[in-house]
Image: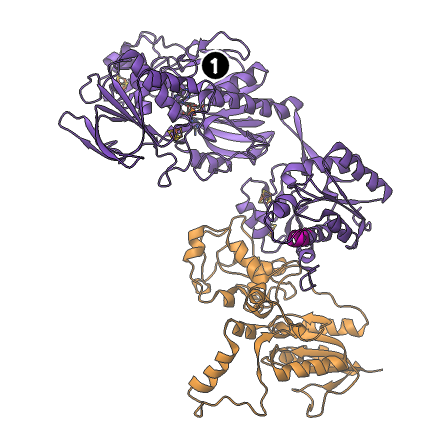
Amino acid sequence: MKNEEPRIGVFVCKCGTNIAKVVDVPAVAEYAKDLPHVAYAGWQLFTCSEEGQNIIKKHIKKHKLNRVIVASCSPKLHEPTFRRTVIDAGINPFFFEMVNIREQVSWAHMKQKDDYGEATEKAKDLIRAGVYRAAELESIGSTTQKVPPVCMVIGAGIAGIAATTLLADNGYEVHLVERSPALGGKSAQLGFVFMTDTCGVCVPPRHGEMARKCLSKRILLNDPKINVYTQTEVTQFSGYIGNFQARLHSKPRGVNIDTCTLCGKCMEVCPVEVPNEHNYGLDNRKAIFYPYSQAVPRAPVIDFDTCTKCGKCQQICPVNAIHLDQQPKETEINVGTVIVATGFDVFKPEGLYGYGEYPNVISQFMLARILDPMSPTDGQLRRISDKRLPKRVGMIQCVGSRDPNYYSHCSRVCCQVAMKHAVYIKEHWPDTQVTVFYKDIRLQGKEYERYYLDAQRLGVEFHRADITDVKEDNNKSLNLTVDHHNGTQEQFPVDLLVLSAAMIPARGAKELARTMNLEVDLDGFFREYHLKLAPVDTTTNGIFLAGACSSPRDIAEASFMGAAAASHAAIPMSKGEVEVDLAKSIVDESLCIGCANCYAVCPYSAIYMEGGVAKTIEVACKGCGICVVECPAEAIQLRHYRDKQIYSQIEGLLANIGASKK
Amino acid sequence: MTVRIATMGMAGCSGCHIALLDTGTALLDLLKDVELVYSYPIVDTKNPIPPNIDVALVEGSIRTDHDQEMAKAMRKQAKCLIALGACSAHGGVNGLANTFNAQEGVEYVYHKTVLMAQKIVPHENVPQVLPADLRLSDVVKVDFVIPGCPPNPDEIAKVITTLLAGETPQLSKKSVCDECPLERLTEIPKKLRRTHEIPELGTCLLSQGFLCMGPATRAGCNAECTHRNMPCTGCRGPAETVWDQGIAMLDALAAMEEDQVANFKLPRLAGTFARYTYASSKLDNLRKGVKKK
Ligand SMILES: Cc1cc2nc3c(=O)[nH]c(=O)nc-3n(C[C@H](O)[C@H](O)[C@H](O)COP(=O)(O)OP(=O)(O)OC[C@H]3O[C@@H](n4cnc5c(N)ncnc54)[C@H](O)[C@@H]3O)c2cc1C
Ligand code: SF4
Ligand code: SF4
Ligand code: SF4
Ligand code: SF4
Ligand code: SF4
């Protein structure tokens, strides 16, 4: 096909009035007729419609076209559509070229002064570049890659668990990798959660079954399809869809979860006492401890950083479940797909509003732990300093969120969390005054507004204000300087100050992104491939995102997303294979000098060195083009984006320079 | 019928002519079939360029208006015009002058250097310096290029005999590494080094962190430098597929750790990466704006 004389068809789209309002589409089509190798050029109202596509097919036959250009919207949107159209007409999809005259022309030049003028000329320029490029295109085939029915889910929060159970219920094997000693993530540590006011550890045992079961029923730990790894992280990662390899490093737990009966004797005898990180120092824990009530697996864990190996726990344990000499474990697993569900962390607002300085300034997460029925205060509202019921509670919203000095995003749940806690306090301690200081109240989830109305009905006060100063008094209460948005200022005393601190990317997310070659956004959350078209996909085929690791989300959303990611991961696994086109890097071995530059820079490990030259693994290559740039001998090229194809496109773009406009 | 050959020198060091003489006995064989009608180091060239030249070899870059006129005059008489050597082919070391303003350069020489007692820039009866150093093909159409500083005598002889046989000579399309005997490591250098840090024998210089221009440079020299453990300086210009020799090597270095590249202070980037090609590099094009023909 290579030497065949190019016969190019150019189809210019009006996109209703989207393009036609700004660009003189018929004039552009007329212009395209005279460009080199163009055998047909015309325009349509909606090229992507069924009818529009049929017209393309008709002209392919009639004019014996072997290259097709559609000048319309972004290739991100319709390139796949038109590739299919040309395939139906018997043309290799890589002989299709798309020119974007909507986002790049009509939308960009909506405000041009003269009707049609400049935008029309720009559309002509871009189409000419496309025509020059189309003449250099080559036919590219595809290959298939086997995908075994095994998925790795990283993070066992609500999103990871939703994904895991859905996959297991559908018969796929899952490796669930959790960094902490317990499953359930943040929501399992929230005593009760909004929307349902149920406890945070409940998850449905099977999808589609309403009966709730606690995580503690060991649903995950007993399912033969699910391999659970706690205290485990992914330390190495490579491969591609169908063939990902991960190296897992598991810290020793020191306790056999199968034989432990959680009698608690070990925790009584252990002489080492340290602040309990799960309760933010509200109480202490031992070196051998059970992370929080209802934690799964239902067995204690030894913190070997503080354990003195005195052996007392081992002696007392009635079932010999304790192994003080347990070693870290390395496991290599091979999986077909991966779901990243590593969730979020709570921003620590050190230095803001007295946090970290005054004991009675806490975060909403700490308040959630205090109000948990199984908390050290038995769910009773208490101040930290004197364990007494606060009479006045203040809450400050958007701490670290929507703040150019910290994080630009809205954390999306903290308004709702504040409502939940305010309502709960008013319901249980009606004499305690609750005041919320906010910039905006943003409640957008199902049933969210109900909590707001409840809060107002119960007498929670809302002030739109900035808190410019916080001072502690002799009682360890706090004096707030409040700048109301109406211009007035006042001093406002509270006994407990609760900060709605931002939800931020999980600790280690950046490192994990680097290990797995995933992208993160400006705030550090994992970046999805396309927010609208592929919200659970990543730039790596076969790796998906779920839950709060890609943006702050509530439990409902995290759970939907877990299910969505699982369904996406199931597609290649149920088919057993994926089709991979070969528009990837290719080495001209006669030019390759074996310098290994490409091998060193490829972010997707798609290149290996053999016999003194570089070789590429097409399935693994993402077509990023970095190797092409790095190769000093220009021996490696990207098919579909070869130098000559790009240069001819540039040549086409510049071909008209100097020619008088119009 | 004898073939009429001419040679000419522009802004150059005559090294290419020496290389031509270095063809040795091959030259003697050649001279049996050809007539050298014009060649300043060899035969008298006071007369104007004679007509009906079959092959003209031009050394040196175009630096003055005189060079420009001579190149055009030679083009008129020659059926086949060959750019001989790096200066003629790519602008050569002279091209580095393009990193300066030409007029300021001239004034510096005539005003500031000690030998110039009078501090006058001569204007009459002397060629005028052009604003930029140009390669031969910037001024006239060139039929063939023999790269190298100096060009390889064997290659010169081969090109001429091929032409005499009525065929088109071919340069190697590969890079110097292709002819280099040193062993490559399949890892990129951790640290950049300067030549005085003495490379290990037998191992690819680039792998050891020495700036060897081999990968981006056209083969055909038999890798003479790296055979002697000296890094290639790129005198033969870009390899066939290489878009821009200097940029290709800069790109390749980008693979290294950021601080390594950032901490490596090169005295002159252009002089290192585009030593022989600056005048024809994309960098110079960018600086000059649109190229003149
Ligand atoms: C104070 C507060 C109160 C809230 N209250 C509510 C509420 O009432 N209702 C509601 O709907 N939402 C609430 N939310 C939001 C809720 O917590 C989240 O929607 C939910 O936890 C998101 O689940 P997830 O699985 O995406 O992430 P997470 O719950 O953060 O789970 C992620 C899991 O991944 C693990 N992990 C992280 N990194 C790694 C790694 N590198 N390797 C292995 N494992 C890793 C973590 O240990 C964790 O177990 C609240 C949030 C806050 C801050
Ligand atoms: S061995 Fe460690 S965990 Fe066990 S009782 Fe002693 S200090 Fe505590
Ligand atoms: S959810 Fe509310 S408190 Fe949280 S960042 Fe958004 S606006 Fe601020
Ligand atoms: S284009 Fe090159 S660097 Fe990018 S993924 Fe493919 S092989 Fe790797
Ligand atoms: S960078 Fe180019 S020359 Fe070097 S190994 Fe890769 S393909 Fe070969
Ligand atoms: S020493 Fe230079 S020429 Fe030889 S292989 Fe290495 S880079 Fe190429």
Give the residue drawn at x 48%, y 34%: A526
Across and down, in percent, residue B272 comes to 51, 65
- Quarter of image, ligand 6: bottom right
Give the chain letter for orange. B
* Observer-nearest of A426 and A554: A426
* Observer-nearest of B228 and A552: A552
Q: Quadrant of residue B223?
A: bottom right
Q: Main secondary structure of the magenta part?
A: helix
Determine if the C-beta at disc 1 is less than 8 A from ligand 1: no
Tell me where the magenta segment starts and ends, as one range.
A115-123
Per the image, the residue denoted by label 1 is A220
Q: Looking at the image, how many numbered discs can be counted on the residues?
A: 1
Left or right: residue A212 versus residue B51 is left
**Amino acid type at mark 1:** Leu
Across and down, in percent, residue B130 comes to 58, 79
Give the chain letter for purple. A
Give the residue drawn at x 50%, y 53%: B254
B163 is higher (above) or lower (below) than B38: above
Viewport quadrant of the C terminus of chain A? bottom right
Across and down, in percent, residue B47 comes to 71, 92
Residue A517 in sight from this viewpoint: yes
Give the residue drawn at x 65%, y 86%: B41
| Residue B50 painted magenta | no
| Residue A122 painted magenta | yes
A143 is higher (above) or lower (below) than B50: above
Tag 1, which secondary structure? helix
* Observer-nearest of B113 and A134: A134
